Each structure stands twice: as C-alpha cells, then as structure tokens.
C-alpha cells in the first residue's frame, strides 16, 4: 500500500486492495494501539469544519493525538477568516503553510475537491453537503468486516433519509464493488435514493436492490440494517421535515423480526429513529462503530503521511 501524499475525497478513490490494506492497518492499531503512539510526532493535522460535528471531528483529533501528532483548526467558520469572505482555495493554501494534512467538512458538495486541487497537502473529505462521507464509509466497512469477516453474500438494508444522506450514498458506492452484496432501500417516496445513485452506481455495477417503504417487511432478510437520521438541516421546508422525521423508528418490537446475528449500524447522531431500549441489544453496533472510526482514521492518517 502506497497512499503517501494522496487525498481521500470519494469512497472509490482507493482500490479494493488499498482499502483492504487500510483495514489491516486499522486492525493492527486496534490490537496494539501503544505501538503507534509516537509515529506522528512532529506532524500537524488541520481540521477545517464548516459544519457542526462531534464524532467525525473528535475522532480525527483523537486519532492524531493518539499517534503523537498535534491538531490545529476551527470547529465553526465564524472563528476563521472564512467569516471575512476568504475562499476555500485561499484557506487551504494558507493552512498548508502550517500543517501536514487537512480534514475538511463543508455544506457545499465538491468543496473538499476544490481544496485538494489547491494544494499538494493530503486532504480528507469529512463530509460535503448531501454528497459523500468516505471516512464514515471506511468506518462502516471496518465495523462490518471485524464482526462478519468480510462482505460476501450480504443483504444490507439502508433506512431513512436516502435522498440527502451522504453516509448512505458513500456506503452504497463502496459496497457495490464487492461480490454478492444486495441492498434493501427503505425510505418514504420523498426520501428515496437519488436517481444518480440508482443508475450510476447500483444499476451500472449490476448490484441487486429493492426499494420499499416497509421496514418490517424487509427486516427478516437483512444481515445489516443501516439506520439514518432524517436531517433537518437538508430541508428547505420545515413542514416537510416535521412530516417525515418519524417515518421509521427502530424499537425492541421491530427487532424481534430480525435475525439473531443482524447488525444495527448508524452513523450518528440519532434523534429518535433508534429507541434507547435497543442500545442493550447485542445487535446494536453503533457505539462500537463510533469507536472504530478513531482507529480507522488513525490508519488513514498514517497511510496518507507515509509514516
């Protein structure tokens, strides 16, 4: 694996082989984290978060600190020169004078790509609007792989906001490269997966999928259930959000319909789409998933810096 100096902007930027090597490195970190506590000493990670974040920002910062490096950046654009009208290109050029690698989250699709085109420093997309979230996808895949050993012959249900959910779009893209994966796309009519994902990803790759509005009907066939939040911030109309926000709620009663070994994933934060009572179920993997995100990002930072 030679990813030194490269950027990660979309889930398919790395080959399957490179992705598998990242999983192997993340596994080594998970098994012996103290072996890696000094490998990034003297290196700086810049976190440029134009949108709110808890898990993604904290996990990147924790990842770099646990590798012995340091972190600079901002958690909201009002505290930077962005508030004065500075462009993304100028911001990233300036940050590259100080840091070795940058992570950017932005509400506009394509903003991380603009940043990457403006610098030779590795840039990581931490989510751009309703487009992509590749490091969340690496985390999701690592969680599945650690629990199930691989991705062969999986039926994956993605449920909730499939229209604006960037984690869903990235996950579908990444899993469509593996043989035997099938999708159940569970959403109300207004939040169905976008046409470009259906045509350019699923149909183009020949990945089997079925669309339904009925979570209970799909549940018995699933190996993985990926729940998502209906995102208030993506709606232009408050009435539409209120009408759709409680479309699907996973509770103990619905879980009785599922297989004993089904995994429940969620990129978090949740609002009320997973009842708190589900947290105690051994099939609930979303907090393990959040912790895996730190290890996955440790591996990614090391690979892109070539340490």
Image (cartoon, rainbow, N blue to C red):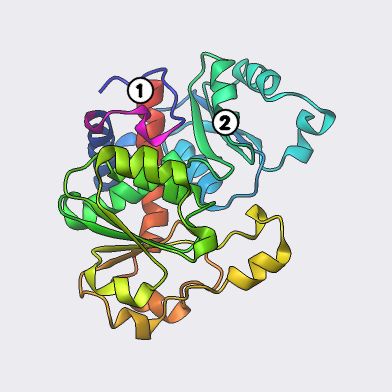
Question: Eyeballing the image, is 63 above or below 273?
Answer: above
The numbered mark at residue 110 is: 2
- Nearer the observer: mark 2 or 1; the answer is 2
Q: Which element carries disc 2, helix, strand or loop?
A: loop
Residue found at the far right of this picture: 84
Image position of 49 (left or right of 220): right
Determine which quarter of the picture holds residue 202: top left
- Assess disc 1: are there few (<14), some (14-19) or many (≥20) residues with their C-alpha within 10 Å of its C-alpha: few
Q: Which residues are magenta?
A: 10-17
- Residue 267 appears in the rendering: yes
Residue at (49%, 66%) from the top-left corner? 188
Please state the horizontal and vertical placement of residue 80, each as a whole percent of the image. Answer: 76, 33
Q: Main secondary structure of the magenta part?
A: helix
- Assess disc 2: are there few (<14), some (14-19) or many (≥20) residues with their C-alpha within 10 Å of its C-alpha: some
The numbered mark at residue 253 is: none
Determine which quarter of the picture holds residue 16: top left
| Camera-side residue of 269 and 297 | 269
Residue tagged 1 = 307
Q: Which element carries disc 1, helix, strand or loop?
A: loop
Look at the image and tell me in which quarter the C terminus lies: top left
Please state the horizontal and vertical placement of residue 213, each as a whole percent of the image. Answer: 42, 69
Contact between labelled residues 1 and 2, with CB atoms less than 8 Å apart: no
| Camera-side residue of 53 and 11 | 11
Image position of 13 (left or right of 23): right
Residue found at the far bottom of this picture: 253
Residue at (41%, 39%) from the top-left corner? 297
Residue at (30%, 53%) from the top-left corner? 143
Question: Eyeballing the image, is 77 above or below 140?
Answer: above
Image position of 112 (left or right of 14): right
Look at the image and tell me in which quarter the N terminus lies: top left
- Residue 38 appears in the rendering: no
């Amino acid at each position: 694996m030679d990813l030194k100096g490269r950027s990660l902007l979309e889930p398919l930027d790395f080959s399957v082989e490179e992705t598998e090597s990242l999983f192997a490195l993340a596994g080594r970190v998970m098994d012996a984290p103290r072996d890696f506590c000094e490998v990034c000493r003297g290196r700086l990670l810049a976190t440029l978060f134009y949108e709110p974040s808890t898990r993604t920002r904290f996990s990147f910062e924790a990842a770099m600190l646990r590798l012995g490096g340091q972190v600079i950046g901002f958690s909201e654009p009002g505290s930077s020169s962005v508030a004065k009208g500075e462009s993304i290109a100028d911001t990233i050029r300036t940050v590259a004078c100080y840091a070795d690698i940058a992570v950017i989250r932005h509400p506009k699709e394509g903003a991380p790509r603009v940043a990457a085109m403006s610098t030779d420093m590795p840039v990581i997309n931490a989510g751009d609007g309703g487009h992509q979230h590749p490091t969340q996808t690496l985390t999701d895949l690592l969680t599945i792989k650690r629990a199930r050993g691989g991705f062969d012959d999986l039926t994956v249900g993605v449920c909730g906001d499939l229209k604006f959910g960037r984690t869903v779009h990235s996950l579908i893209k990444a899993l469509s490269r593996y043989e035997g994966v099938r999708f159940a796309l569970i959403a109300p009519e207004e939040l169905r997966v976008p046409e470009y994902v259906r045509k350019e990803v699923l149909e183009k790759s020949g990945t089997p999928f079925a669309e339904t509005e009925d979570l209970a009907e799909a549940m018995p066939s699933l190996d993985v259930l990926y729940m998502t939040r209906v995102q208030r911030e993506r709606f232009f109309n408050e009435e539409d959000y209120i009408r759709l926000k409680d479309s699907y709620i996973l509770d103990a009663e619905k879980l009785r319909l599922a297989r004993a070994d089904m995994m429940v994933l969620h990129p978090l934060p949740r609002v009320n789409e997973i009842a708190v009572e589900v947290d105690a179920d051994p099939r609930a993997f979303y907090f393990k998933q959040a912790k895996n995100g730190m290890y996955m990002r440790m591996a990614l930072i090391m690979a892109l810096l070539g340490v």
